[in-house]
Image (cartoon, rainbow, N blue to C red):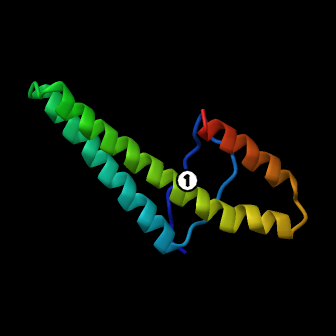
Amino acid sequence: MAEHKTEECCCCSGKHKERGEKEYKDLMNRLKRIEGQVRGVEGMLENDAYCTDILVQVSAITSALNSFNKVLLANHMRTCVADNIREGNDEVIDELVTTLQKLMK
């Protein structure tokens, strides 16, 4: 397994998940691309780009974030949720429902 930084976050549950190298790299690559897109929009704004051009780029960022969430959610369900259910921890279902409700706001 890859060694990844573990930092506490004000909005995290305090739980941790060790990700495989492939999953980690895929998720990080997606985030780096999104970060680049956001920087691109920042540059567009600094260069007085036309509103609709910026809006189209922001829409692309939103789509990329939604795609990131779909991949992460699928991985979570295949690993964390499935493992917890196999171990008899059905509370993870309530946690998943709460998470889905937050995602669907």
Relative to 78, residue 31 above or below? above
Say whether residue 90 is visible: yes
User: Would you say 44 lies left or right of 20 here?
Assistant: left
The residue positioned 25% from the left and 40% from the top of the image is 57
Q: Position of residue 28 (x, y in %)?
A: 41, 59
* Near-viewer residue (52 or 98): 52
Q: Position of residue 11 (x, y in %)?
A: 61, 35
Give the position of the C terminus as an image quadrant.
Answer: top right
Name the secondary structure under disc 1.
Answer: loop
Say whether residue 13 is visible: no
Relative to 75, residue 69 above or below? above
* Near-viewer residue (11 or 44): 44
Residue extending furthest left? 47
- Identify residue for label 1: 6
What's the amino acid at mark 1?
Thr
Q: Position of residue 89 (x, y in %)?
A: 88, 59
The residue positioned 51% from the left and 67% from the top of the image is 3
Relative to 59, residue 96 above or below? below
User: Would you say 102 lies left or right of 97 here?
Assistant: left
- Quarter occupied by residue 1: bottom right
